[in-house]
Image: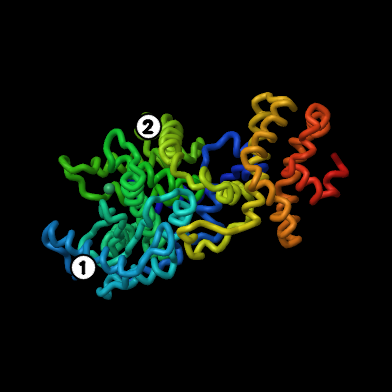
């Protein structure tokens, strides 16, 4: 088995030398990819991956442990109750309870300061309409574990499980504190997402065929691998740590060696690059790796399909607009969005625009003609007449720079699509009354001159 340091070094090298094109226009992207948030929402520029975490002095030696499952459950209930004392203000609430042990205090300090959970949890909170707030609590458990507490919408990440990752990776990191921090935080975030997977399965009543522990690993990997070039490094560290867990043949968890190879396969499948052979092992390369891209695509597609009814943007044009807009990402350490959603006229304006652009793009991509386009716009207006009536007010009310943003980033695509505008108007004079189109036209006279 290769060491974690070697895996990390190799994958880092790979990441540094790869040159995948960034997504350009929203249109082809929208038409060809599953409904997933852009990677930059998940792994924002400057994300330290835990390289800034200081785990000096962390050890499990001397840390008291529970002696029975009853004691473990009682402690989980104490943790849950302590966190529940404060009402949740966001769809996913993260609570960092301080450690009572000096050996674990650096774990609390690193995670409460680094906020490594928040970016990915923020994406999930923005994406999914959860029936109740999900609470994530990090605490001393007197147990090396992480748990989703069924029926309580509460997820507990134990300081002790992080300490176990520190002890596992410390010799491999060979004194490189940043490498240790990255590996530990990666394995911890994967563990968090595994428990989130259990939570989603329960809260959203997702059907599971097969083993739920395996499903939770795959949910975690798919989230982690939204941006394979960053996520693969994390997933490989997580695979390494998972492979070191003790295995019990009758346990509900698959054997840890299998879990390791499954996560590795998803990571390498997501990367889907010939150079990944440098990372894998010979037999694995020969027998498993060729199928890994399909394995990853299947896992991602299945999860997307299962989550589809729960995507918030299906229910909110504002969120759909936020998702597809190219707005500069906000601070990844910013608080999670409020339970009741957002209020953003800019996003609202984008939403109407997005509906028109995406709808027309889809029609044109399927070979639709001017008649089909006109019919679509007319139907859209009729279905949304009340909201559309406010579009002009919304656009006019925007600050000039934001309006310019809106037009520059998106409006050109409408005009590109509406090269058919003249034919549309000739064939369907009623299109002149389409408030949504006219509002855009009036706001961008300069652009109009060219059409
Ligand atoms: Zn599990």
Q: Residues within 10 Å of mark 2 (few under 14, many from 20)?
A: some
Residue 179 appears in the rendering: no
Instruction: Place residue 29 in its image quadrant.
Output: top right
233 with respect to 430 (left or right): left
Q: Position of residue 336 (x, y in %)?
A: 47, 61
Q: Position of residue 225 (x, y in %)?
A: 46, 45
Q: Quote the CA–CA distance across marks 2 and 1.
A: 39 Å
355 with respect to 255 (left or right): right
Secondary element under disc 1, as helix, strand or loop, is: loop
Instruction: Place residue 256 in its image quadrant.
Output: top left
Q: Is residue 270 above or below residue 53?
A: above
Q: Quadrant of the N terminus?
A: top left
How is the protein colored in the picture?
rainbow
Q: Is mark 1 within 8 Å of ligand 1?
A: no
Q: Position of residue 377 (x, y in %)?
A: 69, 35
Q: Is residue 70 above or below residue 290?
A: below
The residue located at (52%, 43%) in the rendering is 314
The residue located at (48%, 61%) in the rendering is 338
> Which residue carries the number 1 mark?
61
The residue located at (72%, 60%) in the rendering is 397
Q: Is residue 382 above or below residue 180?
A: above
Instruction: Place residue 178 in its image quadrant.
Output: bottom left
Q: Quadrant of the C terminus?
A: top right
Q: Position of residue 171 (x, y in %)?
A: 32, 60
Q: Is mark 2 within 8 Å of ligand 1?
A: no
Numbered tag placed on residue 288 in the rendering = 2
């Amino acid at each position: 088995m290769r060491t974690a340091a070697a895996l990390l070094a190799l994958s880092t090298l790979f990441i540094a030398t790869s040159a995948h094109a960034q997504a350009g226009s929203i249109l082809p992207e929208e038409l060809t990819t599953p409904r997933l948030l852009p990677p930059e929402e998940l792994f924002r520029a400057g994300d330290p991956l835990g390289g800034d975490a200081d785990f000096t002095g962390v050890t499990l030696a001397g840390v008291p442990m529970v002696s029975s499952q009853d004691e473990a459950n009682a402690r989980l209930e104490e943790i849950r109750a302590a966190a529940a004392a404060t009402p949740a203000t966001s769809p996913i609430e993260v609570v960092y309870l301080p450690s009572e042990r000096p050996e674990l205090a650096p774990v609390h300090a690193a995670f409460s300061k680094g906020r490594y959970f928040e970016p990915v949890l923020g994406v999930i909170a923005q994406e999914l309409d959860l029936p109740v707030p999900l609470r994530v609590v990090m605490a001393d458990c007197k147990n090396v574990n992480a748990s989703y507490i069924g029926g309580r919408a509460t997820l507990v990440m134990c300081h002790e499980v992080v300490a176990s990752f520190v002890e596992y990776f410390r010799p491999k990191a060979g004194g490189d504190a940043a490498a240790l921090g990255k590996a530990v935080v990666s394995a911890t975030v994967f563990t968090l997402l595994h428990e989130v997977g259990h939570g989603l399965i329960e809260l959203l009543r997702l059907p599971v065929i097969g083993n739920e522990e395996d499903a939770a690993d795959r949910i975690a990997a798919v989230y982690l691998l939204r941006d394979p070039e960053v996520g693969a490094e994390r997933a490989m560290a997580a695979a390494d740590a998972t492979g070191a867990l003790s295995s019990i043949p009758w346990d509900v968890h698959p054997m840890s060696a299998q879990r390791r190879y499954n996560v590795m396969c998803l990571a390498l499948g997501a990367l889907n690059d010939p150079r990944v052979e440098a990372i894998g092992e010979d037999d694995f390369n020969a027998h498993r790796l060729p199928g890994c891209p399909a394995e990853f695509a299947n896992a991602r597609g299945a999860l997307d399909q299962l989550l589809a009814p729960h995507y918030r943007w299906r229910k909110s044009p504002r969120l759909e607009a936020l998702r597809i807009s190219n707005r500069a990402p906000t601070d990844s350490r910013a608080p999670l969005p409020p339970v009741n959603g957002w209020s953003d006229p800019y996003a609202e304006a984008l939403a109407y625009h997005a509906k028109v652009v995406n709808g027309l793009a889809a029609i044109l991509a399927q070979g639709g003609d001017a008649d089909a386009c006109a019919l679509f716009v007319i139907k859209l207006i009729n279905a949304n007449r009340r909201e559309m009536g406010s579009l002009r007010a919304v656009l006019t009310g925007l600050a000039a720079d934001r309006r310019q943003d809106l037009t520059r980033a998106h409006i050109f695509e409408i005009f590109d699509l509406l090269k058919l505008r003249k034919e549309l108007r000739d064939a369907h004079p009623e299109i002149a009354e389409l408030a949504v189109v006219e509002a855009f036209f009036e706001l961008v006279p300069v652009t109009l001159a060219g059409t």
